[in-house]
Structure formats: structure tokens, C-alpha cells
Amino acid sequence: MATDYDAPRRNEADELGEDSLEELKARRAEAQSSSVDVDETDFNESLELPGADLSNEELTVRVLPKQEDEFTCSRCFLVQHRSRLAASRGSENYCRDCAA
């Protein structure tokens, strides 16, 4: 299909100006009727509050011990890869984030 790029372009404002008042009212009614029905009970079940009792929950994350090429930062206590080691002072190791 050939396109004439020199012809004036039409936008939505031009098209809306040509519509009748009844068509515009019908479009508005359709837009308002497309609201999503949310089941409040489903929403409340997935919501967890801080301090909630999680004693009956089971941990599903596999925890690995610290590897040979990792260290624990003495300031933030996160296990980091050796490539993130910024400074060592005695037995204390600091990551790049904490040394800056």
C-alpha cells in the first residue's frame, strides 16, 4: 500500500471532532464499564503485615556456606566475592561499598 507522506496527517483530536455527541457518550460509558473487579478476600490473603506470625512457614531457599573465594565484610557483614575486596586491615576485610 502506497503512503502519501505529503498529505496532512490526521490525529485523534481531528477524529473526535467529527464524532457525534451520542458516539462520544457511548465511548465514555464503554470506558467506564471496563473496570476490573477485585476480590478483596484474595487481596487480603496475599498481604503480609510486619511482625506477622510466620512460625508455621517453611524456608524454601537453599543456603550455601561461604565459599573459598568469598569474604565477609567487617562493616556491612555481607558475604562478598573476592573481586569486591577493597581493603584489609589485619583480620578485618571491607567491601568496595563500605571502604568508599
Image: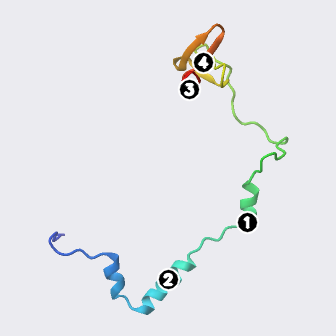
Describe the element under mark 4 as helix, strand or loop: strand
Q: Position of residue 50 (x, y in %)?
A: 78, 47
Task: Say which amino acid is labelled 1.
Answer: Glu
Residue identifier under label 2: 28
At 48% from the left and 88% from the top, the residue drawn is 25
* 21 to 54, vertically: above or below: below
Q: Is residue 89 visible?
A: yes
Describe the element under mark 1 as helix, strand or loop: helix
Task: Say which amino acid is labelled 3.
Answer: Asp
Q: Nearer the viewer, mark 3 or mark 2?
A: 3
Residue identifier under label 3: 97
* Residues under numbered marks 2 and 1 in contact, where contact means CB atoms less than 8 Å apart: no
**Other-residue count near label 2 (Cα within 10 Å), few / some / many at <14 / 14–19 / ≥20:** few
Disc 3 to disc 2, C-alpha distance:
53 Å
Disc 2 to disc 1, C-alpha distance:
27 Å
Name the image colouring: rainbow
Q: Nearer the viewer, mark 1 or mark 3?
A: 3
* 86 to 48, vertically: above or below: above
Q: Nearer the viewer, mark 4 or mark 2?
A: 4
Residue identifier under label 4: 94
**Quarter of the figure with the C terminus:** top right
Q: Residue 40 — which label?
A: 1
Disc 1 to disc 3, C-alpha distance:
43 Å
